[in-house]
Image (cartoon, coloured by chain):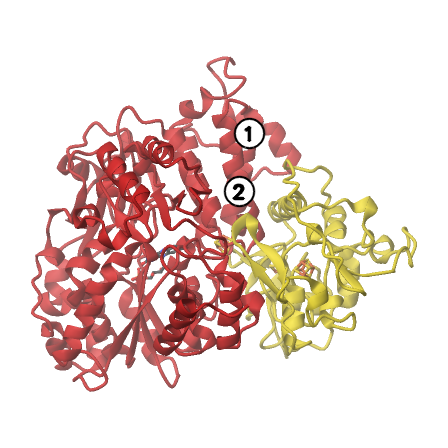
Chain colours: A red, B yellow
Amino acid sequence: MPLNTKTDARLQSALRQWGAHDHRLLQVLRAVQTPAGYLSAEVLAAVADSLSVPLAQVRGVASFYSFLSTEPVGDFRVQFSDSITDRMDGSAALLDKLCRLLWAEPGHVAGDGLVSVATTSCTGLCDQGPAMLVNGRAIGRLNHARIERISELILARIPVDRWPAELFEIVDIVRRRDLLLKCELEPGAALTVARRLSPAELIGVIARAGLRGRGGAGFPSASKWAACAAAPGPERYIVCNADEGEPGTFKDRLLLSQHADLIVEGMTLAGYAVGASHGLLYLRAEYLFLRDGLEQTLARRRQAGLLGATAAIPFDVELHVGAGSYVCGEETALLESLEGRRGIPRNRPPYPVTHGYRDRPTVVDNVETFCAAALVLLAGAEAFRKRGTAQSQGTKLLSVAGDSPARGIYEFPFGVTVRQVLQAAGAEDAIAVQVGGPSGTCISVDEFDRQISFEDLPTGGAFTIFGPTRDIFEVARSYAHFFAHESCGFCTPCRVGTSLLARVVDKIHAGYGTRHELAELEQLIAVLGKGSHCGLGHSAGNPIRDTLLRFMPAYERRLASADFAPAFNLDAALAPARRMTGRDDPAAHLGEGS
Amino acid sequence: MSQTFLLDGVAVPFQAGQSVLQAALAADRYIPHLCYHPEFRPHGSCKLCTATVQGRLVASCTTPAAADLVVHSDTEELRALRRTLVQMLFAEGNHFCPSCEKSGSCQLQALGSDLGVTTAGFRHYFPDRPVDASHPDAWIDFNRCVLCELCVRASAAVDGKDVFAFSGRGLSKRLIVNSPSGKLADSLFAVSDKAMHVCPVGAILPKRVGFAVPIGERRYDQHPISEQALADAPRAAGEPDV
Ligand SMILES: Cc1cc2nc3c(=O)[nH]c(=O)nc-3n(C[C@H](O)[C@H](O)[C@H](O)COP(=O)(O)O)c2cc1C
Ligand code: SF4
Ligand code: SF4
Ligand code: FES
């Protein structure tokens, strides 16, 4: 069946913008699917044809990303953000209410194709939740009044473009500024400093500053840049990781909306340092509302001679938008996604610094890392390394969310204790903090003197606070479902293990759990940690591991056989399971803290 | 003198470009594996070949061999891990061995018995995966697919047909067929394809073949997979070309 003229026009315009190349597949699919539309069999076939890609591969990509749909969705596609903080802010009741008002059922199209209501992973608006996306556009601070307003607009079939602008207003709340957020960049100023240095000298300055990656892993940035600069290749690439998918993180959102010049400046000087003239910025689909602003920044910089092939440092940046997949924040999955494929993490070695985007030497860095690099040039390596600790130089942006009267972005020098952050956020009564999101660490009260730093508690930026009334089991359960939903499915331990983990905590939640289930959790956590292919699987068991150790009563009181003697020894209870699985290694034992 | 690394305390020679698993097999040392096939570039997804290399757990099929590496494979920790992985694969699909033509020649089943998997371990998912019997000469029972990607790789690299791909993600990941209808009959697939013959389990089978080899005399009935895999391993080392 031929395409209708409107769809065909969209396809032609997508092909003009992106070119008819197989590695543009994802961006073309994004462009041909209207915000409220879906990718019909005809569209998929036309795309396969135009890009000379096997149809099954097109289907494979379309079905990998949450925001692409191969089934009809409503004219109004409503996706409630389903982060634990959205739930704490009452998202479930609001979702129910909207469904009732619209006669809709979650996960189904209602009203003769009028609307579909579903949930999606954290949309990065935890400082102003509950949040949702309507046809890809973010709405925060949901409450009953807003839900009623939204249902009226939908029932009246008012196109989203004509909805009141204040619904879509996203506020950036900065509660504490330090070196980075105080920096007022005169566009081009860091590049002027950079150009007085040779590329090797520039890398030397970054090394002297001690800059380490802000995406979570903390890899020394100068080593990464130097390795990329030294790798042979006709072309090199700089990739800015703006996928920010870790539930509870939203600090890159602030940088992308308020400090875009600083980001691009950092990317440009990275390009100068490694000899790359191409940059790619991968923006998560949930942040689509930031795209126009970013494009404007790029355009302004091109006009000012700071960006582009003829700029003093010849370097340009292309913006790619993701399509709803957490694993695409993993740097090699991100490269796959940039190349238009399913976001499956690659085998390493080789590493991106030698074989990255399109097999060329590539630097992949977090948004904040590029900002910090520009800051190092502006403020000087010494001023930069004066902040922080011995192994964690500079400052860190924290996305403070959850049970705090003062949510928002806090910039602290590395080394700040959890307690100090809680004090600043007016949340001294917290019972737990999830540092670094579900893939990070959940700590309890007796550990609040630990430090935010690479040597103690590393974090990509999430700092989610749980107050005295929270049920920590439910927190862990929500995270377990997050990982099961986001597993790419490549490797056995994570594909099956994350799902089993979610199923077991659901069973415990339903009151059917026994000690056998606790043992099964243990076993799954071990297999995920040992066998998984990438960081997603490696850390997928963390929330349950941490909460089993620190909040065992939250599990115990749900067990079907909860009336056992209070001196219940969990480790002894695990002995039969250990025998069954033939294990006796340290990870098969629960520690003292439980 | 060729260089060596240590596998469970014994020196294993290797050549440049070989992975730890390839070198081990060529040297008559077995490490369990499922998604690895000697004729194809290693994929690294099933994780059965996981070994401790320099103290880190990695897939040995994708880890390049290097001089003086210290590798451990035959440990109780790793045997337990592999048993669990096999149980996970059984739980994920629908494997009714007694009625499967591949029984006895199936690598998943053979691994299970060789590794001593005696219980189901996990409650099975019993997913709904309809069979594709559209093709005149072959049929696909998706219920048995372990997502090793061998048929995908074979069809793309050897047959040049791209008949197979994957859709979905996480537990919803499925093998799909490249044709407008999604049916095998409408694809370029032929029984002479390499993709027809690489499936380690009973997911892609020829039609009209039943009990040609009686049960009890099948491939892994004769020798456990740990012996058979060594017999199958290429001795002349070198990187596979596809
Ligand atoms: C599952 C997963 C998700 C990730 N998501 C992100 C992300 O959203 N943003 C990010 O910067 N890094 C993310 N990372 C880390 C990246 O792989 C990579 O380490 C980082 O982009 C490197 O940049 P940096 O050195 O500047 O930190 C993720 C890693 C994993 C395993
Ligand atoms: S660990 Fe999970 S996300 Fe990572 S490759 Fe394996 S299945 Fe994919
Ligand atoms: S059909 Fe067979 S060869 Fe193909 S992916 Fe499934 S198990 Fe592997
Ligand atoms: S054989 Fe190595 S991961 Fe499958």
Q: Nearer the viewer, residue A504 or A382?
A: A504
**Quadrant of the image for the N terminus of chain A?**
bottom right
Q: Nearer the viewer, residue A56 or A399?
A: A56
Is any atom of residue A460 visible in this view? no
Subunit bearing disc 2 = A
Of labels 2 and 1, earlier in sequence is 2
Q: Position of residue A97 (x, y in %)?
A: 33, 32
Q: Position of residue A243 (x, y in %)?
A: 33, 58
Q: Is residue A15 found left or right of B158 in the rendered image?
A: left
Subunit bearing disc 1 = A
A587, above or below A41, in the image: above
| Secondary structure found at label 2 | helix
**Which residue is depicted at the point 41% across and 49% down?**
A74
Picture quadrant where residue A379 is located? bottom left
| Secondary structure found at label 1 | helix
The three-letter amino acid code for the residue at tag 2 is Ser
Q: Position of residue A560 (x, y in %)?
A: 53, 19
The three-letter amino acid code for the residue at tag 1 is Glu
**Quadrant of the image for the C terminus of chain A?**
top left
**What residue is shown with label 1?**
A517
Determine whether label 2 and label 1 are within 8 Å by CB. Answer: no
Q: Nearer the viewer, residue A466 or A311?
A: A311
Q: Mark on residue A499?
A: 2
Is any atom of residue B202 visible in this view? yes
**Which residue is depicted at the point 43% across and 34% down?**
A477
Q: Position of residue A260 (x, y in %)?
A: 18, 64
**Which residue is depicted at the point 39% across and 31% down?**
A474
Q: Is residue A332 found left or right of B136 in the rendered image?
A: left
**Which residue is depicted at the point 45% across and 78% down?**
A21
- Label 1: how many residues lie within 10 Å, few (<14), some (14-19) or many (20+)? some
Picture quadrant where residue A193 is located? bottom left
In the image, are marks 2 and 1 on the same chain?
A: yes
